[in-house]
Image (cartoon, rainbow, N blue to C red):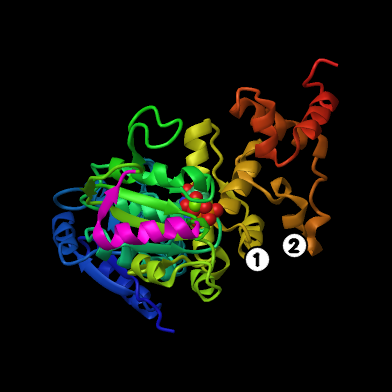
């Protein structure tokens, strides 16, 4: 491992001090540069930055405090240590109020110098890490709302960037909750189609009988009940993007029609005779193994190849664990903005558990678990006790230390939250909670949420 050498700038008009301090720091393996005035120091900054500045308070031109202000403006993370003569300690304290890291009194004690220096550098590293994490979050890795810095996600961004402005069809595969829809949207919003529509069609939820007319539209009177002409979703997406979700569920008849559309880029409304030329981009997604579906003759091979011109396979979260802390913090930030609580972060154990866990529900599951913990947590940090027992058990050896969670209260809070989210619609709330409406009503009664 190569050790990074830290660069320190020492500023003093007394050459002896510079000599002494430089020698001590060099002995401790730091890279040292010196300047005899604040002006010279500022100039040195134009040849690169420093990890630490040590400056005398009293300098011939601009003062040490002015240099401090310059440094803070340039990069607030760089620590500054002030050197002060006996009798001017008050000035040093003043400087600390302005953001100086600490001060050293003359005559300088080498041990104190070394200790303070290593403390300052350590703090610098910590701050840098935080700042990087924050800007990484802010940049959101340049793709819409997609968070992730793992190498596998970076490769996906590269492909997305390359294909955004082409007309090629894209097939996105990945387990449930890996972010397929998010990726589809990001491709659309990063392309020159962004000003046009992004139309989603969920092939799993539209009954096959009406799917054709949904996709291609129909003419008035084309079948019983067709009282009006209807524009299909493909036509609505003209010059935009159509997202065909759960494409693996499309029935054979429609697979054939979709293939024809992809070959000819024309549609025929149901009951119509006129072919309509369209310019739409198709992005399809599935959590099925389409190649296997093709082998089993459930999915047309020719359609598979038409869709799979560009393929993006999003890895499950357990295969990119680097992204977990980043994602968890991202969801926390979002909740803080939305809900108004200010929770600062996660206890180390929580992140440890998150990294240990396998995430069968992928990013969606992580989002839900962070949200649940957020709702329950009254403090400044999310601690292990706000995780479900299933997760807490991953740290079994330590779980006895933690308070018993008040399960009854937890349940009540989750129910009230689901109810509030749905304007007290019991069926919808039951769905969110993953229980039957009857079970919900029983629980509501027990918690005094229903008139007895
Ligand atoms: N990389 C990511 N960064 C931020 N949020 C993400 C990321 N991946 C997924 N999410 C969030 O997780 C949730 C699930 O994502 P999405 O709906 O895109 O998954 P999906 O792969 O389409 O799942 P399904 O197969 O179940 O439809 C969404 O709320 C989404 O915003
Ligand atoms: Mg989806």
161 left or right of 250 in image: left
Q: Position of residue 300 (x, y in %)?
A: 45, 68
Q: Which mark is residue 265?
A: none
Identity of the residue drawn at 52% across and 57% down: 249
In this rendering, is residue 359 above or below 219? below
Pick the front one: 9 or 417:
417
Identity of the residue drawn at 38% across and 80% down: 27
The magenta span reads 251-269
Q: Which residue is mark 1?
A: 356
Q: Residues within 10 Å of mark 1 (few under 14, many from 20)?
A: some
Secondary structure mostly seen in the magenta stretch:
helix
Pick the front one: 324 or 131:
324
Describe the element under mark 1 as helix, strand or loop.
helix
Q: Position of residue 117 (x, y in %)?
A: 41, 64
Q: Residues within 10 Å of mark 2 (few under 14, many from 20)?
A: some
Residue at the outermost bottom position: 1
Please tell me in which quadrant of the rendered image residue 318 appears: bottom right
Residue 266 magenta: yes
Pick the front one: 319 or 183:
183
Mark 1 / mark 2, whichever is N-terminal? 1
Identity of the residue drawn at 15% across and 52% down: 60
Q: Which residue is mark 2?
A: 395
Q: CA distance from mark 1 to mark 2?
A: 9 Å
In this rendering, is residue 413 above or below 270? above
Please tell me in which quadrant of the rendered image residue 396 appears: bottom right
Q: Disc 1 vs disc 2: which is toward the camera?
A: 1
108 left or right of 44 in image: right
Describe the element under mark 2 as helix, strand or loop.
helix
Q: Position of residue 91 (x, y in %)?
A: 33, 43
Identity of the residue drawn at 43% across and 55% down: 254
């Amino acid at each position: 491992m190569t050790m990074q050498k830290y660069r320190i700038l020492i500023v003093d008009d007394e050459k002896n001090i510079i000599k002494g301090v430089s020698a001590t720091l060099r002995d401790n393996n730091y890279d040292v540069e010196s300047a005899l005035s604040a002006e010279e120091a500022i100039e040195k900054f134009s040849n690169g930055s420093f990890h630490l500045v040590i400056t005398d308070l009293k300098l011939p031109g601009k003062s040490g405090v002015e240099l401090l202000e310059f440094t803070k403006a340039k990069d607030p993370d760089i620590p500054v240590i002030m050197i002060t003569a006996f009798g001017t300690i008050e000035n040093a304290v003043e400087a600390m109020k302005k953001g100086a890291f600490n001060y050293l009194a003359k005559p300088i004690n080498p041990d104190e110098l070394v200790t303070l220096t290593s403390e300052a550098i350590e703090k610098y590293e910590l701050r840098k890490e935080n700042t990087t994490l924050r800007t990484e979050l802010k940049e959101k890795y340049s793709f819409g709302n997609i968070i992730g810095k793992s190498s596998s996600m970076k490769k996906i961004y590269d492909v997305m960037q390359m294909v955004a402005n082409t007309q090629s069809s894209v097939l996105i595969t990945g387990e449930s909750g890996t972010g397929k829809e998010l990726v589809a949207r990001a491709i659309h919003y990063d392309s020159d189609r962004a000003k046009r529509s992004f139309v989603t069609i969920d092939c799993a939820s539209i009954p096959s009988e009406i799917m054709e007319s949904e996709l291609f539209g129909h003419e008035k009177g084309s079948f019983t009940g067709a009282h009006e002409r209807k524009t299909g979703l493909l036509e609505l997406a003209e010059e935009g993007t159509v997202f065909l979700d759960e494409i693996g569920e499309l029935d054979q008849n429609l697979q054939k029609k979709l293939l024809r559309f992809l070959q000819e880029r024309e549609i025929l409304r149901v009951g119509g005779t006129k072919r309509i030329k369209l310019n739409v981009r198709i992005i399809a997604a599935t959590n099925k193994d389409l190649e296997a579906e093709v082998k089993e003759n459930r999915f047309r091979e020719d359609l598979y190849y038409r869709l799979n011109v560009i393929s993006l396979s999003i890895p499950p979260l357990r295969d990119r664990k680097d992204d977990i802390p980043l994602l968890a913090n991202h969801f926390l930030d979002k909740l803080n903005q939305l809900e108004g609580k200010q929770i600062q972060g996660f206890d180390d154990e929580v992140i440890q558990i998150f990294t240990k866990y396998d995430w069968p529900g992928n990013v969606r599951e992580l989002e839900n678990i962070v949200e649940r913990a957020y709702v329950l947590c009254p403090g400044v940090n999310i601690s292990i006790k706000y995780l479900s027992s299933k997760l807490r058990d991953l740290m079994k050896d330590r779980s006895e230390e933690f308070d018993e969670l008040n399960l009854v209260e937890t349940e009540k809070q989750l129910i009230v939250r689901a109810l509030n989210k749905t304007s007290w619609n019991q069926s919808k709330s039951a769905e969110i909670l993953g229980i039957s409406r009857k079970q919900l009503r029983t629980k509501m009664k027990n918690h005094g949420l229903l008139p007895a």
